[in-house]
Image (cartoon, helix red, strand yellow):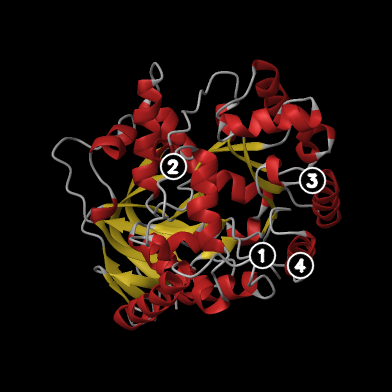
Amino acid sequence: MTLFLRDVTFYDWRTERLLRGDLLVDNSPHGSLRATADPPPAGATVIEGGGRLAMEGLTCGHHHLYSALARGMPAPARAPRNFAEILAGVWWRLDRCLDLEMVRASALAAAVDCLRCGVTRVIDHHVSPNAIAGSLPAIAAALEEVGLSHVLCYELSDRDGPAAAAAGLDETAAYLASGRPGLVGLHASFTVGDELLAAAVALAAKHRVGLHLHVAEDIVDQERCLADHGRRVVEHLAEHGVLEQRGSLLVHCLHLSPDERELVRRSGAWVVHNPESNQNNGVGALHWDGLDPARVLIGTDGLHGDMLRSMRAAFLSGQAQGGLAPALAWQALWTNQRYLERHHPAAARRNDVVLFDYLPPTPLQENNVSAHAMFGFDARHVRTVIAGGRVVLEDGRLTGLDEAAVMQFCQEQARRLWEALDQPAPKGRP
């Protein structure tokens, strides 16, 4: 059914204009969103905007949906002292305990979180070494149940042995062959051997997609690469053809040399900035100099689903590094959608809309929208969300599923996961 939004102040990120008037939202699979001066068509559902702010649904440039059940999880026996110990003691310990029911619960919980923050599209990076087969379709189904579009991948790594690496390649190949939007996922280079890296690049080339991997998040990535290969991370990836795959996502990119920055800038790869995760792990901060700002996305790295919060964190982190204009962080937020439209158009729905219950105390104008985004409207103002042309959040209430029942299921799976975390660490197996 066609939706008619009456009297909204619509921010068009493509033109950077504010348009006051009515919007017509088509709910067909490739539906459109357009301003109209005509009355509502017969049979249309009318939503009263009251002049409030509206914009397209937001996109998360990098998520780890599987981390949703980690909130409040049992701490490791010994507090991690560095990034390598955080990985081994927290995240690798958790991901080895996941089964498909936990994977589904994680995706549902994270999707609801995203939706309530006005996020309707997610680029995810998944890993569950003891539940690989069927994990990507399970995530896709959960996201679609909530109403989110998606670009998925499985994180390939040698850290859980050759059988798990082979199973990850099989899962990736099957998912990409299904025609759904996806990427070839990799863990950071220090857990990926040359044979697996070559197989991943070949798979990406076969399906004409990019790779999605963490790059120089911590200095340990550079140290291991120099010790193992005699070259720096981006140089190593470039030699193996990663940068040649259009649409590759290089996540973090904190510890890059000027030469590596130039390699990234000249390539077709995109950088994904995750400011709060960087701060949480104490790994450093992104330096924008030498990068192409038109190819810097923003993600959450699994901490949450609030992209407006992440954008604000990117701005504040940039300020701490010597200054970052609000408009540049605001631009990076919409670069997420530019990336989808260029490389994954099937996931870049144009009939997703967020309506904010935001009454600005100062004039909201085309030249100051980014300032209102930094210091004014945020997730608490999300009132109504339209995804794929249908209303999925109406006046703060989910319309397509029983949220209480979903969260009860998620809590049950979280308890199972936490009980597993108290057992001896399982070995990786497909």
Residue 24 in view (yes/no): no
In 3D space, how far apart are the residues under numbered discs 2 and 3 (Cα atoms)?
Answer: 26 Å
In 3D space, how far apart are the residues under numbered discs 2 and 4 (Cα atoms)?
Answer: 29 Å
Q: Mark 2 = which residue?
A: 277
Q: Mark 4 = which residue?
A: 167
| Amino acid of disc 2 | Ser
Q: Residue 384 falls in which quadrant of the image?
A: bottom left
Upstream in sequence: badge 2 or badge 4 = 4
Q: Residues within 10 Å of mark 3 (few under 14, many from 20)?
A: few
- Up the image or down, 150 lies above or below 259; here it is below
| Amino acid of disc 4 | Ala
Query: Element type at marker 2?
Result: helix
Q: Mark 1 = which residue?
A: 428
In 3D space, how far apart are the residues under numbered discs 3 and 4 (Cα atoms)?
Answer: 16 Å
Mark 1 or mark 3, whichever is nearer to me: 1
Query: Element type at marker 1?
Result: loop
Q: Mark 3 = which residue?
A: 193
Q: Residue 42 falls in which quadrant of the image?
A: bottom left
Q: Residues within 10 Å of mark 1 (few under 14, many from 20)?
A: many
